[in-house]
């Protein structure tokens, strides 16, 4: 011990030989520390490791430089499996006393055995991991880790206690009791171990015999009783007295043998055979149950896979439909662009014909705007073209061609925006009328009545359901049509050069040549020959 004031080694005097300070209290503290060290040493000798650790910690609180107490504390830690804590104490002791210190020997022993040191470190890590598993309620993984810890570090008392506690939670008291007995062999008076054993005894109602030597004596006594000897104590001496031996007769021996055989057969028949059958039945039932469970699992997996396949097939079908729709839309866009090129190049008629074959439903966005613009642009031109062709055929009494062209003209103006839409419908209805297609003629006439009610009287007489007029007539009296009607009048063959300047269509003498004007359309002002060609 050294003086706390000047660090001078102290002697037997109560005063420091270096600075003369009164060191009575310091020496008294040292004596208390040594007393606690001796008490801890006594406890360690009887393997009361927990008590020894408590006494040695108190000793170091009084005098932390007590290297003997610190070295012994390290040994106690090492005995309970806590090698890291032991190494810490020995390192501190070595720093406090660099010469003639047993800590050097302990540290060298640990450092020279690298495998053992690594094994201890791994066991500490696994123990900490098992504690974390317990906090996460993952008991199975904790038990596996603790078994590995005990195999690597069989002196770690905390591992025995934690594993025993997990077994206690599962009510596996026999396993827990065995582990706690091993922990008692390391630390005989550990309060935690003893408390766990007491809880097991309370739960099972069976006390735990920790005296293995006493158990061996009891076993020897049972063996001696089985061997036919009687043992008892007389003072401090063991008296062994043989039991009375009686010789049996031959008949009695034979009877005993027969009885033994019969008893053995009965035991086999009533105990072993039923148990074997039950075991075989249980095994068969278990195998059937496992097979059924596997079959059900496979069926469920097959159904799930089939559902997944069906889902993929539906996705493929949807993708193919989307692809076809996209390709159709691309084709429609290409056709729309082709129509736009025809319109820009001045071929309005062909552009209009192709545009009629398209539907606005397939377009959207800018394409729909382009479609609507082209439709508006070519509808008037298309209507005029078909109207002129149809009326020309009508004048030539080619009613079939007239009906076809006039139907296209009416179709080209679905919103009835053209001024000649009524005339086109009227000529179309009359063309059907002269062709004998009364159903189509009636349908057109009814539309005229619906769209142009002011001109209903013009066509009512030609509707089959309400008229009895002569349908074989080849001429039509259009004098009552008013401004919306177009009169067809046959001119005198002798006045072929005369042209009616009214709004009606003027028809010339049919005896003219093909290059001469046959009739003039008042709407467009164009003149046509007998073949329907425009004559300048």
Image (cartoon, rainbow, N blue to C red):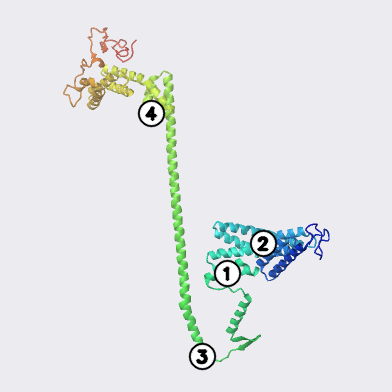
Q: How much space separates mark 1 and mark 4, taking CA atoms?
A: 90 Å
Q: Identify the image quadrant of the C terminus.
A: top left
Say whether marks 1 and 2 touch (CB < 8 Å).
no
Residue assigned mark 1: 197
> SS at mark 2?
loop
Q: How much space separates mark 3 and mark 1, taking CA atoms?
A: 52 Å
> SS at mark 4?
helix
Question: Between tags 3 and 1, which lies in front?
Answer: 1
Decide which of tag 1 and tag 2 comes sooner along the chain: 2
> SS at mark 1?
helix
Q: Identify the image quadrant of the N terminus.
A: bottom right
* Picture quadrant of residue 342: top left
Q: How much space separates mark 3 and mark 2, taking CA atoms?
A: 67 Å
Badge 3 density bin: few <14, some 14–19, many ≥20, Cα 10 Å: few
Identity of the residue drawn at 54% across and 67% down: 172
Say whether marks 4 and 3 touch (CB < 8 Å).
no
Question: Between tags 1 and 4, which lies in front?
Answer: 1
Residue assigned mark 3: 252
Residue assigned mark 4: 360
């Amino acid at each position: 011990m050294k003086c706390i004031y000047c660090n001078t080694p102290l002697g037997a005097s109560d005063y420091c030989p270096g600075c003369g300070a009164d060191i009575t209290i310091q020496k008294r503290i040292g004596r208390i520390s040594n007393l606690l060290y001796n008490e801890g040493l006594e406890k360690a000798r009887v393997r009361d490791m927990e008590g020894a650790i408590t006494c040695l910690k108190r000793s170091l609180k009084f005098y932390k430089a007590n290297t003997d107490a610190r070295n012994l504390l390290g040994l106690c830690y090492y005995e309970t499996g806590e090698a890291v804590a032991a190494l810490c104490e020995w390192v501190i002791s070595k720093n406090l006393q660099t010469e003639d210190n047993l800590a050097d020997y302990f540290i060298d022993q640990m450092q020279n055995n690298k495998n053992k040191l690594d094994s201890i470190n791994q066991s500490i890590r696994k123990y900490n991991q098992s504690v974390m598993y317990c906090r996460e309620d993952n008991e199975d993984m904790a038990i596996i880790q603790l078994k590995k810890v005990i195999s690597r570090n069989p002196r770690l008392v905390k591992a025995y206690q934690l594993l025993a506690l997990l077994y206690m939670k599962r009510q596996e008291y026999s396993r827990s009791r065995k582990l706690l007995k091993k922990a008692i062999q390391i630390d005989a008076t550990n309060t935690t171990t003893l408390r766990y054993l007491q809880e097991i005894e309370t739960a099972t109602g069976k006390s735990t015999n920790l005296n293995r030597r006493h158990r061996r004596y009891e076993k020897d006594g049972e063996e001696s009783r089985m061997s036919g000897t009687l043992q008892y104590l007389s003072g401090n001496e063991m008296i062994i007295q043989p039991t009375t031996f009686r010789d049996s007769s031959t008949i009695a021996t034979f009877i005993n043998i027969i009885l033994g055989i019969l008893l053995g057969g009965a035991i086999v028949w009533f105990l072993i055979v039923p148990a074997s059958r039950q075991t075989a039945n249980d095994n068969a039932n278990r195998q059937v149950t496992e097979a059924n469970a596997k079959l059900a699992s496979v069926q469920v997996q097959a159904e799930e896979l089939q559902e997944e396949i069906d889902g993929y097939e539906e996705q493929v079908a949807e993708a193919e439909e989307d692809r076809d729709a996209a390709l159709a839309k691309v084709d429609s866009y290409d056709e729309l662009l082709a129509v736009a090129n025809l319109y820009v190049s001045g071929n309005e008629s062909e552009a209009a014909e192709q545009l009629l074959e398209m539907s606005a439903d397939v377009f959207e966005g800018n394409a729909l705007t382009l479609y609507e613009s082209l439709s508006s642009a070519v509808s008037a031109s298309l209507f005029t073209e078909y109207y002129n062709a149809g009326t020309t055929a009508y004048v030539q009494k080619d009613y079939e061609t007239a009906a076809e062209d006039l139907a296209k003209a009416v179709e080209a103006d679905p919103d009835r925006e053209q001024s000649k839409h009524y005339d086109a419908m009227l000529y179309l209805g009359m063309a059907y009328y002269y062709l004998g297609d009364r159903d189509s003629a009636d349908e057109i006439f009814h539309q005229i009545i619906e769209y142009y009610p002011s001109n209903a009287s013009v066509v009512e007489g030609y509707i089959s359901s309400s008229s009895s007029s002569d349908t074989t007539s080849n001429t039509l009296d259009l004098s009552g049509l008013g401004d919306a009607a177009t009169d067809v009048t046959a001119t005198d063959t002798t006045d072929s050069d005369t042209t009616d300047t009214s709004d009606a269509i003027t028809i010339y003498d049919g005896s003219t040549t093909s290059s001469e004007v046959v009739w003039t359309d008042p709407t467009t002002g164009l003149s046509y020959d007998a073949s329907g060609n425009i004559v300048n």
